[in-house]
Structures are given as C-alpha cells and as structure tokens.
Image (spheres, helix red, strand yellow):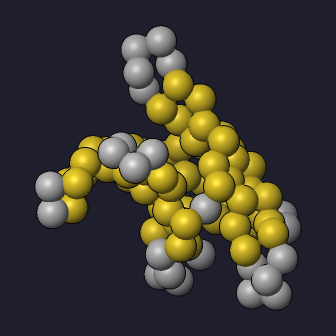
Amino acid sequence: MEQKICPVDVIAVCSASGDIRPLRFRMEDEKHQLLRVDIDEVVSSKPVQYVGIEAWVFLCRATIEGQKRLFELKFTIRSHSWQLMRKVY
C-alpha cells in the first residue's frame, strides 16, 4: 500500500439526487508522466469530516496495465477539490 496524498484531476458525474460518482482521474506517475485511470467500479463511498471539513471518500477499483488496483479518492465539498489518498496494490 502506497500512501501519498496528492491532488488529481477527476471527471465525475452527479445524479439528480446530488450523489457524486468519479468516472476517471489523472495522476502523475513515477516518471512524471500523466497517467489516465478509468474507474471500473466504486467499491464504497462514505462521508467523513477532517477537523470540521466535510468530504467524501471513495474506494475505487481500476485496471492499470492489465492489473486490478484499488485507489482511495477524497472529494472535499467546500473547495470542490479531489485528492488521491492512497493506492492499494
């Protein structure tokens, strides 16, 4: 498990009821190249509060280079920003 918090670009969809679901994100790999990750499945999502800051944490499954990986993404509501919290291998 690699834990490195970094901002990422995310494409997400919002339902009519206000639910948000990430579809894909873009991150920088070890070679400093942009890597596009298509999310196959959102395994779980839960609301969290960090020192009074509301956020949603999504555990997502994606296929990279033929291997299934788990990623944890955090969406901060007030700032409308996404962060990659950790990669689970």
Q: Position of residue 32 (x, y in %)?
A: 79, 83
Label tally:
0
Q: Quadrant of the C terminus?
A: bottom right
- The reply, left or right, for residue 76 in relation to residue 54 is right
Q: 41 or 50: nearer the eye? A: 50
Can residue 24 be seen by looking at this rendering?
A: yes
Q: 62 or 75: nearer the eye? A: 75
Can residue 59 be seen by looking at this rendering?
A: no
Q: Position of residue 41 (x, y in %)?
A: 60, 43
Quarter holding residue 9: bottom right
Residue beneath the point at 80% across and 66% down: 35
Q: Position of residue 51 (x, y in %)?
A: 15, 63
Q: Position of residue 68 (x, y in %)?
A: 69, 62
- The reply, left or right, for residue 65 in relation to residue 78 is right
Residue beneath the point at 43% across and 56% down: 74
Q: Residue most toward the bottom?
A: 31
Q: Residue most toward the top?
A: 16
- The reply, left or right, for residue 49 in relation to residue 68 is left
Q: Residue most toward the front?
A: 79
Residue beneath the point at 50% across and 55% down: 82
Q: Residue most toward the left?
A: 52
Residue beneath the point at 48% across and 52% down: 81
Quarter holding residue 30: bottom right
